[in-house]
Each structure stands twice: as C-alpha cells, then as structure tokens.
C-alpha cells in the first residue's frame, strides 16, 4: 500500500531533517521559526508512525540512528531537488537582474572596481550588489530570495553550493605618515595596544579580535592591552582610519593591495599570515545559467588577483627583519 504524504507527515519530515542536520532541536526550531518543544514533538510523532527510533537522545547531543541516517540522506537530496526546481520555475519568466549579497568591504574595495569589465563582457546579465555579511544557509537563501552571495568566512556550507574563489592573507598596514611618526616600530614586538585598529566583525560569528590574535600568535608576540585600539564593524572602516594616520589596521590583501602598490599604505613588517577565512561564492542548488556565469567570472578574477598579489607581496610568512622597516621608511620619504 502506498504511503500518503499528508501535510502532517511532511511537517514531521521537515522537522526531522532540520534536527538531524543540526543535531540539535533548539537550532532546528530557530531555523523553522517554531518552538523547540514543537520540533521535539513532531519528531517523536514521526518515530511513532515509523515504529522505530531516528535519534539516540544523549545528555549532550542528538545522535542519528542508522535508520535516521538513511532517511536524512533521502530527505536532503529530495529537498535540494525540490528547491532547485522551484527556483528554476520561478525564474523562467523573470529576466531581471541577479541580486548578489556580498560582504560590504569586499564589495567596495575589490568587486565594484571590476564590475565594469563584467558588464562589458556580459551585457545581457544584470547584477545588483547588496552589502551584507550575515550567515547563510539553504533555508534563509530560499526564504529571502537570495540567488547568490559572496562571503568572507571559514566556509563549512553543508547544505549550499559554495566555491572558494580567493584565499586571503593578513598583514598589518599603516600610512607612511604614521610610520614616520613612530620610528620605534621596527618589529612586531614594538606594537602597542593603543596603536591597533580593529575590525570586530570580520565575519558573522568571529571573535572581536580574531584577525589580530591570529597574526600576533604567528608572529610570536604578545601585545599588552592590545584591545585598547579603536574598533570598527567593517574592515573598510579600519583601513580608512589607517589611511588617515590613525593607527595600524589588520589588512586583508584583497582590500589593501592597491594602496600598498601606490604607497598610500605600508606593509609594516613584511609578515603575512594566511587567514582562516576565504572568499566563497555561495548559491542554492539549481542555479541559473546567469548565476553560473557570475561564479565562473569570479573564479577567473580571483586567479588574476592572486597572480597580481604574488608579484607585489612575498607571501612566505617569514620573521620580520629591521630592513623591512627601513624600506618602508624610505618609501614614504
């Protein structure tokens, strides 16, 4: 006898899939905008209907049973296929511009200056860029109608199509005027907390001082009271403060390479540290040909930028030398 997919059964399955993906009823409830008790109750009803457990409920986590794993795999593939088809059907009669949600600082400093080439080569594709950096998952993209996004973060998009198109390196930068005013800055050990400019939101969920902590740990330096410096919620704001001589920002190469090339900013110590975050092109499954074109263009642009970056910077993370500091001083003079 065929199983009838009633509205109740579909609701149970949706709650189970979200709970299995998160291994947590509370996170599943937050995603589905219902209570934790409702998720737990619907999963229990599904288990009673199937007459078998789908989770082992331990004090610390939900553990999916082998039967639950079978069901989770089928549901994941099915929901992705349904969402992809719905997305394509919605766009068949819609030839409007693509909405690209993009990390704001990256949009301003890296993406926007390159868009003229994209529009020249792809005049038939409209593209609207929105500065946003909130975390994304499949449910949010479908609910908000986000066709594609660029995010700077550590990745881990389990339920979306995500492709890294550019890695990132961290390096402290300051204006030539700031360097000239602080001749004591010869090695990272000369840094003081009040000099530092912080982007407290490098990505959604990052610690306030994640980038400076990572760079200082690599350099083997502890800066007393390093949290005293000025704080900003965008990397671009911290870089702008550095450009006006207000302190030392933790630069990302995609955002500061041009300023280093032109001499507006100084690569202070020549110590470059690989960031734990990269730039990802994120889209739901079943992307349109236009979205696929944007993805391929970004991959090609990322490769060109990496080649340019390699010509400008020595990305071997070596220990700083006083000579690097002397070269920076000569450049500003």
Image (tube, grey):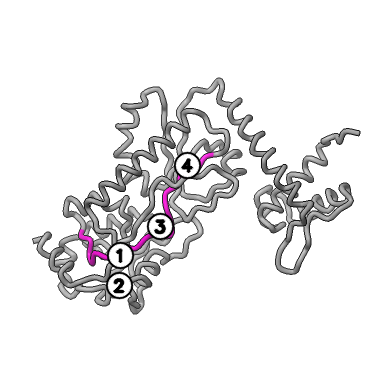
Of mark 1 and mark 3, the one earlier in the sequence is 3
- Which residue was labeled with disc 4? 149
- Which residue was labeled with disc 3? 233
Q: Secondary structure at mark 1?
A: loop
- Which residue was labeled with disc 1? 317
Q: Crowding near pointer 2: few (<14 within 10 Å), some, many (20+)? A: some
- Which of label 2 and label 1 is nearer to you? 1
Q: Residue furthest left?
A: 333
Distance between the Cα atoms at labels 3 and 4? 20 Å
- Which residue was labeled with disc 2? 194
Q: Please say if the residues under marks 3 and 2 sit with CB atoms less than 8 Å apart.
A: no
What is the span of residues highlighted in magenta in the rendered image? 266-283
Q: Crowding near pointer 1: few (<14 within 10 Å), some, many (20+)? A: some
Is residue 25 visible in the rendered image? The answer is yes
Q: Secondary structure at mark 2?
A: helix
Q: Is residue 267 in the magenta section?
A: yes
**Residue lying at 44% horizontally and 37% vertically, measured from the top left:** 295
Position in image of residue 216 (x %, y %) = 35, 71
- Which of label 3 and label 4 is nearer to you? 4
Q: Is residue 284 left or right of residue 302?
A: right
Distance between the Cα atoms at labels 4 and 2? 35 Å
Q: Please say if the residues under marks 3 and 4 sit with CB atoms less than 8 Å apart.
A: no
Q: Is residue 139 left or right of residue 221?
A: right
Q: Crowding near pointer 3: few (<14 within 10 Å), some, many (20+)? A: some
Of mark 4 and mark 1, the one earlier in the sequence is 4
Q: Please say if the residues under marks 4 and 2 sit with CB atoms less than 8 Å apart.
A: no
Of mark 2 and mark 1, the one earlier in the sequence is 2
Distance between the Cα atoms at labels 3 and 2? 18 Å
């Amino acid at each position: 006898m065929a199983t009838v997919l009633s509205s109740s059964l579909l609701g149970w399955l949706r709650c189970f899939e979200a709970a299995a993906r998160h291994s947590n009823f509370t996170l599943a409830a937050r995603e589905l905008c219902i209570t934790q008790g409702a998720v737990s109750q619907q999963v229990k009803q599904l288990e009673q209907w199937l007459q078998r457990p789908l989770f082992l409920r331990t004090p610390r986590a939900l553990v999916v049973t082998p039967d639950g794993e079978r069901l989770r795999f089928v549901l994941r593939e099915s929901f992705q296929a349904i969402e992809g088809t719905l997305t394509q059907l919605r766009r068949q009669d819609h030839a409007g511009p693509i909405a690209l949600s993009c990390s704001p600082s990256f949009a301003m400093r890296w993406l926007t200056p390159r868009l003229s080439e994209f529009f020249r080569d792809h005049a038939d594709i409209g593209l609207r860029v929105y500065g946003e950096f909130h975390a994304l998952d499949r449910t949010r993209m479908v609910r908000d109608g986000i066709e594609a996004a660029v995010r700077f973060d550590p990745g881990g998009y389990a339920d979306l199509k995500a492709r890294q198109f550019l890695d990132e390196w961290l390096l402290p930068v300051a204006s030539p005027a700031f360097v000239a005013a602080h001749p004591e800055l010869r090695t990272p050990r000369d840094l003081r907390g009040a000099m530092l400019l912080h982007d407290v939101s490098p990505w959604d969920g990052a610690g306030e001082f994640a980038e400076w902590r990572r760079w200082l740990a690599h350099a083997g330096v502890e800066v007393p009271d390093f949290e005293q410096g000025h704080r900003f919620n965008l990397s671009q704001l911290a870089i702008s403060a550095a450009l006006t001589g207000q302190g030392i920002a933790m630069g990302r190469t995609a955002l500061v390479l041009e300023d280093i090339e032109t001499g507006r900013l100084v690569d202070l110590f020549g110590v470059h540290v690989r960031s734990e975050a990269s730039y990802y092109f994120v889209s739901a499954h079943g992307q349109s040909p236009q979205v696929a074109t944007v993805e391929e263009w970004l991959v090609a642009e990322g490769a060109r930028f990496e080649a340019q970056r390699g010509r400008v910077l020595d990305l071997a993370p070596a220990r700083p030398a006083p000579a690097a500091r002397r070269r920076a001083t000569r450049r500003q003079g």
